[in-house]
Image (cartoon, rainbow, N blue to C red):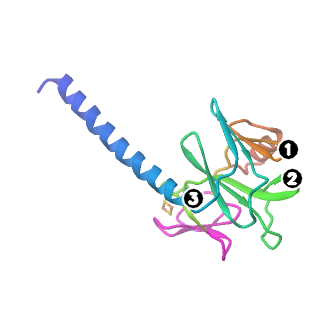
Amino acid sequence: MSDKSSERRQFITGLGLAGFTGLGAIGALYAAKRSWDPLPSVKSAGFTTIDVSPAKENQLVVEKWRGKPIFILKKSAEMKKDKRDLVIGGANYHISIGLCTHLGCIPSYRPDSHDFLCACHGGEFDASGNVTKSPPPSPLVIPPFKIDGTKLVLGEEGPEYKKLKDAGLTA
Ligand code: FES
């Protein structure tokens, strides 16, 4: 077989694998999303604007930004506040990319214990995305954001994001 055709075959096999993995991730996202009401959102050129005002306390909302799941969790009064929280419209929110920092699985939220469990290898995060049980090596990552009234603009680095980033709290 010529080098060209073997390269071509590898490319096609790669595409098949990527497609399969992608479909699995979309299926998981769809299954996750079905159980939550989506928030009003607008997507344009790499930015996603989400109005968080309809979010309900202690109910995880999963949005999508640049192909990644984004966790949005409005904290209730009894939930621990954290320096990684975003304050929007007077309420505290945890926002993160919903991929475990160990090997990239999507953790699930447990409203009763206010934490995230990653079923792949048993990693756990608190409701602010901090690791409470290994193997994840670091907290859930906070994506670039800007706060605009009750809206969250994902993909733009606003002053609140820069402050968290400078303090080393986004990753
Ligand atoms: S991928 Fe989450 S614990 Fe391994």
| Three-letter code for the amino acid on which mark 1 is drawn | Gly
Left or right, 139 with respect to 92, comes to: left
For marks 3 and 2, give the one nearer the viewer: 2
In this view, the residue farthest toward the bottom is 112
Tell me if residue 50 comes above or below residue 54 in the rendering.
above
Q: Position of residue 59 (x, y in %)?
A: 68, 65
Residue at 81% of width from left, 74% of height from top? 78
Give residue 108's position: percent from left, percent from top. Answer: 56, 65
Q: Position of residue 110 (x, y in %)?
A: 62, 71
Query: For the residue carrying disc 1, how many other residues have a C-alpha within 10 Å: few (<14), some (14-19), or many (20+)?
Result: few
Q: CA distance from mark 3 to mark 1?
A: 34 Å
Give the CA separation, mark 3 to mark 2.
32 Å
- Indicate the secondary structure of the residue bearing disc 1: loop
Which quadrant: the N terminus? top left
Q: Quadrant of residue 7?
A: top left
Kindly identify which residue carries mark 1. Answer: 149
Q: Which residue is mark 3?
A: 137
Query: Looking at the picture, does residue 102 appear above or below residue 68?
Result: below
Looking at the image, can residue 105 be seen?
no
Q: Is residue 58 visible?
A: yes
Question: Residue 13 location, x and y as percent?
Answer: 26, 38
Q: Quadrant of residue 34?
A: bottom right
Local secondary structure at mark 3? loop
On the image, numbered disc 2 is attached to which residue? 89
Residue ID at (65%, 69%): 115
Residue plotted at (76% across, 56% down): 54
* Residues at marks 2 and 1, CA–CA distance in whole angstroms: 7 Å
Magenta range is 110-138
User: Magenta segment: does it hold 131?
Assistant: yes
- Circle 3 or circle 1, nearest the eye: 1
